[in-house]
Every structure is written in structure tokens, then in C-alpha cells.
Amino acid sequence: MRNQDVFQWKVAVLGAGSMGQCIAQFMATHGHQVFLYNRTPANLDKALVQIRRNLDTLADLGQLAPSEIPAILGRIAPGSDLQASVVQADIVIENLAEVESVKKTVFQQLDTYCGPDVILSSDTSTMNIFEFVEVSHPERLIITHFFNPAHVMPLVELVRGPHTSDEVANAAKQFLEHSGKQVAMLNRCIPGFILNRITLSVFREAAHIVEEGVATPEDIDKAIVSTFGPRYTFEGPFGLSDFAGIDIYERLATLLPPVLCSDTECPELLHHMVKEGKLGVKSGEGFYRYEDEAAARKDRDTKIVKMIAAIRQVNQG
């Protein structure tokens, strides 16, 4: 590593969209110098405005002092020159479009601009970059999958490639944990990693129940929030199965699989929603209606922050 002290690492974040801006904000909040790159300067301006709004929300919730905000913003250096944005970095976190050609090209540039001791990571949520990204030192290539909103959600999935070294994996894990994240390590890349696989499995069954006319989206959400909600704040599926009884789970796993949805295609419900332009918060309507996108996101972020604080208190107690 260029710098053995992870507290002093400088971070280059590529892409100033919703994920990139939140990662940049998170890293700057935890004391790191951040270089936020975006090819379009106007998008950088928008990102800085949203980062300021996010910081104001956190201040309103007592998560940081208003007096800290100028220093946090001062640690974020926006730029539209890729080489200048990464030349000082100890780790690069790529958040560009989920398009193979885009990622392949940018990592080729990073391989030229960054020394062999700089960790190159991608925030991809779906792609196995190890299949197509080529760098001269593949042992430094890794996936760091953050969750939206990245400045609030505590988890990062850290995915090793076939050539990722133990040194790089351990250093990246230490860096993320010292920055305030919890890390789930994957020893190899599988489609969807951990959370997206489980999330889509749940959604596929929920969509199937709606398509069969058994229950509405509202009632399914109510059922999930009222049961999974409180349970999964402190225990995962394996911990839950211990309390329910492994024998009970064995019986459920014997009886239910034949009647569960096992489709290998996208649910028609999603195709229908997309055709109607109902894309969720960003379009003003999905399964629910949203009059004000900014207000909706602030309300959701506020609830997540409060829940994380409550969960932390319960688990510590």
C-alpha cells in the first residue's frame, strides 16, 4: 500500500450521481480527503448541492454539528479531469454507468494514471468486473458495493476477484471499518452478491403473489414491515431460524418449494410498471405516489438514520 495508515488515505470517487455523491460525503465526513470526479461539471455542482442538503439533514437529526459542515465540504475536491482526480488517491472507488465498455475503458485509464500500490475498486451492484476489466496488477482490483443511501447505510459488500491479494482485501476491509462501515466479505464474485440475490428472491415471490391476485402490494409491504422489520434489525435468517426451530424450517423447506415462484424471467409486474413510466420516486409514482422527490428522500433518510440509532442502542443493550 502507498500509505499503511488507512486513516490518512485519500479517496478518489468516480461519478457524482446518487451513489458517488453519497460515498464522497461519507468519506469526507470521516476525515478523508476526497476527489470527486465527473465528466460533466454541471453534475458536480448538483452533487455538491445535494451533499449540503444531506449534511443539513444529518445536522437536524443530531448526527453531526452544523459547525462541522464547512470542513466536510472543504475535504471534497470536485473535478472533471480524471487523471488529476486520481493521481493522489490511495483508493479509487468507481461509480460510473453499469455498462461494460464504460468500466473497461475507465479502468484502462486508471491503470495508466495510478501506481501499482493504489487499490482500484468498483461500486458495481450487478457486474462481475473481474471477467472483463484488465489491469497490469490485478491483485489490487476489488469490488466495494455500497448501499443507497451510502452516507447512511452501514454495510459494504467487499468482493474479491480471482487475483485479489490478501493484502489488498485486508487493507480495504480495515479502511472501510475504520471509516465506520460494516463489511461483508465475499471470497468470490457471484451475480448479485449477497443482498441483491436475497432482495430479488423476496421481490420475485412478492410480485408473484400480487400477479396471482392473492394480496396487494400495500398488504405485502405491511406484512413484511410488521414481521421482517423488527426481526431483521437484530438477527438474520440463520439467527431467526434458530429461534423458530431448525425442525420447523426443515418442514417449511420441504413443503413450500414446490409452490414457490421459480420463474427465471423478470416478473411481468415490473415490465408493466416500466412501460407505464412508473419508475418509483424518481418519476413521482411507482407502487406508491410521491409529490416531492426531495422531501420523500429526506423522509426516508431520516427514518433510516433513526432506525440505525435505535438498532445500535438495542444491540448494545
Image: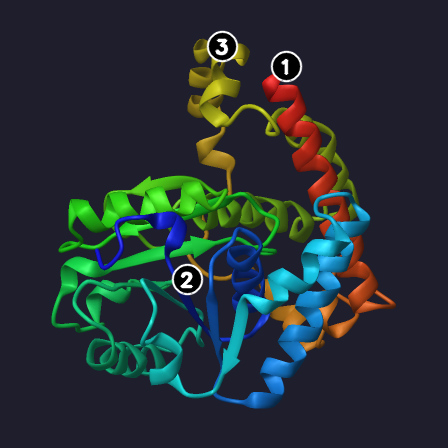
Residue at the spot x=63%, y=61% of the render?
A: 71
In the rendered image, residue 166, in percent from the top left (x then y), is placed at: 17, 45
Q: Of marks 1 and 2, which one's residue comes earlier in the chain?
A: 2
Spot the residue most to the right.
291
Q: Nearer the viewer, mark 3 or mark 2?
A: 2
Circle 1 SS class: loop
Circle 3 SS class: loop
* Residue, disc 3: 245
Side of 196 relative to 316 (left or right): left
The answer for how far apart the CA atoms under marks 1 and 2 are is: 33 Å
The answer for how far apart the CA atoms under marks 3 and 2 are is: 37 Å
Badge 2 amino acid: Asp
Screen quadrant of the N terminus:
bottom left
* Residue 118 falls in image quadrant: bottom left
Q: Nearer the viewer, mark 1 or mark 2?
A: 1
Badge 3 amino acid: Gly
Q: Does any portion of residue 76 appear in the rendered image? A: yes
Q: Of marks 3 and 1, which one's residue comes earlier in the chain?
A: 3
* Residue, disc 1: 317
Residue at the spot x=35%, y=49% of the render?
A: 6
Q: Along the line of sight, which residue is nearer the eye, 71 or 156?
A: 71
Q: Estimate how packed mark 2 is, as few (under 14), some (14 to 19) or many (20 or more) residues with alpha carbons within 10 Å.
A: many
Q: Are marks 1 and 2 in contact (CB under 8 Å)?
A: no
Residue at the spot x=50%, y=27% of the render?
A: 236
Residue 123: numbered disc: 2
Circle 2 SS class: loop
Q: Nearer the viewer, mark 3 or mark 1?
A: 1
* Residue 275 falls in image quadrant: bottom right
Screen quadrant of the C terminus:
top right
Q: Along the line of sight, which residue is nearer the eye, 6 or 238?
A: 6
